[in-house]
Amino acid sequence: MTAQHHPMTPAWPPKSAPRLFVHVPLTDGVPVLIEGPQAHYLARVMRVGAGDAVILCDDLTGEWACRVREAGKREVVVVPEVHSRPREAVPDFWLVAALLKKDRFDAVLEKATELGVAKIQPVITRRCVADKLNGERARTIVVEAAEQCARTALPELELVVKLDLLLRDWNPHRTLFFADENGGEPAAAAFAAHSGPAALLTGPEGGFDDTERAAIRALPCAVPISLGPRILRGETAAISGVGVWMAVAGDWK
């Protein structure tokens, strides 16, 4: 006797289920209490109720389909039921990006997260217009971008560091691709020629000065690259450079 199929039975969890990162390890059947802005988002914006599906990720075990047990105005209780995906494998690639004006650096944080970098290292150079980064706000942008594009791993977001200190402490075993507006090896060819741990360094609105450029090029592991014949804004250089690396050497292959 063949099994009866019920085409009208909706898939669970539905694709429309809200997705959130949480700060606690997720375990099958162990309730999770969600409070604060996330609870407000679930209860007031998405209007979830008991029995509804929510997708949770903990940046440790991966993605879980959960069912809402209780939905109040200030807190929501959900129970993990299905471990749907393990934490994704992330290429060992960092973005080292000079600080830009707030909205432009917001775009860098968001798009670098979507593209799949393992770490974002903000850096201050001599020509940076901005010299501070609101860490809590930056973290929120990264988490929301990861939720939006269904990542199961969050990139590490490092504290801001000055360029000279970054270069002083750089691990010589990690290739530092240097997006030099004065030119270098075509990016795709350089990315293809150097395997292993890597990072991309991009500059601020005014570019790097000659002293900085010389210091970067003096690193044995630095590889100056060109991102094409046009002058790119800082955020464009960062986003396009990461995209090219992912296509040539990362997990787009």
Image: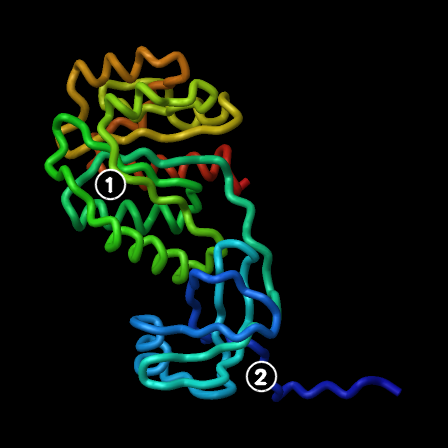
Residue position marked by numbered label 2 in the rendering: 10
Q: Quadrant of residue 207?
A: top left
Q: Position of residue 4 (x, y in %)?
A: 77, 88
Q: Is residue 155 visible?
A: yes
Q: Position of residue 172 (x, y in %)?
A: 43, 18
Q: Position of residue 61 (x, y in %)?
A: 56, 57
Q: Is residue 252 visible?
A: no
Residue position marked by numbered label 1 in the rendering: 235
Q: Is residue 3 above or below residue 157?
A: below
Residue 56: numbered disc: none
Q: Residue at x 41, y 79 (%)?
A: 76
How many numbered marks does the figure carry?
2
Q: Secondary structure at mark 2?
A: loop
Image position of 40 (left or right of 80): left
Image position of 80 (left or right of 238): right
* Quadrant occupied by the N terminus: bottom right
Q: Earlier in the sequence, mark 2 or mark 1?
A: 2
Callout 2, which amino acid? Pro
* Quadrant occupied by the C terminus: top right
Q: Position of residue 137 (x, y in %)?
A: 24, 55
Q: Cα distance, mark 2 to mark 1? A: 42 Å
